[in-house]
Amino acid sequence: MGKPIVYGADYSVYVRIVRLVLEEKGIDYELVPVDVFAADGIPAWYFEHHPFGRIPAFEHDGFRLFETSAIARYVDEAFDGPALQATEPRGRATMNQIIGMLDAYAYRSMVWDVAVERLEKAQPDEALIAGGLAQASKALRTLSALKAPGPWLLGDQLTLADLHAAPIIGYFVKVAEGQNLLAEFPDIRDWYARIAARPSFVQTEKIG
C-alpha cells in the first residue's frame, strides 16, 4: 500500500487528530499543507478533496475521504498496528459518544471562544470568553463522568476518544484560563498529562 496523504495545516486541531491516529498506528504519511485562512483563499484544487473547503482531507491509494472521524476510523481499520477502537458494543458506543460530545460542545468553546479569542485578538471579547469557559466546564465535567477507571478515557485501552480529546484540550490549555479550569478536574488533568507525554503528541506539536 502507498503512503497516506493528509491535507491540512499543522495548526489545526482536527488535522492533528488524524496525525495522532497515524502516529499511534506507526504509519508513515505525507502532510500536504493547506491553509484555509490564507490571504488569497483556499486553493481551487483543494475542493476536489473536500467540497466544503475544510481540513483535513485524506487520500490513500486513490481512495479519498474527508471528515475527521471517518478518516480516523478508516486508518484504524485499514492498517496494521494497535487497535484504537473498543471491540465490545458499549465501549465503542461510549467512545463515539465522547467524540460526538467533544465535537458538538467542547471544540468551539475551548478552542475558539477561549483560546483563540485570548491568544489572537488585540481586544478579546471577555463575555465570549466567559461563556466559553462555562461551556468548557460543563464539557470537562461530562468527560470526567464518562471516563472509565484506568489511564485512558475508556480504561486500559487507548482509543480514538483519547486522540480526539487531546488536541482540543491541548489548545485550551495554551491559555491560563484553560489550565486553571482543567486543574479543577484532577482525573482529566492527569489523563491529559499522560497523553501529552506520548511520542505521538510530542511529534505532532506545532512549532512556532
Image (cartoon, rainbow, N blue to C red):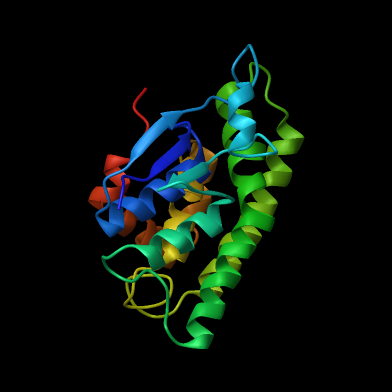
Q: Measured from the top left, where is residue 142 in percent x and y? A: 60, 69
Q: Quadrant of residue 122?
A: top right
Q: What residue sits 54% from the left and 24% below the top? A: 35
Residue at the outermost front position: 62
For the residue pair 111 and 92, the one nearer the viewer reads as: 92
Q: Is residue 102 above or below residue 56?
A: below
| Residue 145 at x, y percent in the picture | 55, 75
Task: Relative to 133, say whether 148 is above or below.
Answer: below
In this view, the residue in front, 128 or 94, is 94
The image shows a total of numbered marks equal to 0
The extreme right residue here reads 127
Residue 170 vertical placement versus 149 (above, below): above
Residue at 66 percent across and 46 percent down: it is 109
| The C terminus sits in image quarter | top left
Q: Left or right: 39 with respect to 164?
A: right
Instruction: Report if residue 15 is visible in the image.
Output: yes
Q: Residue 184, position in %: x, y? A: 50, 59
Q: Residue at x 47, y 63 (%)?
A: 73
* 20 up-or-down from 39: above or below: below
Residue drawn at x 37%, y 78% as measured from the top left: 155
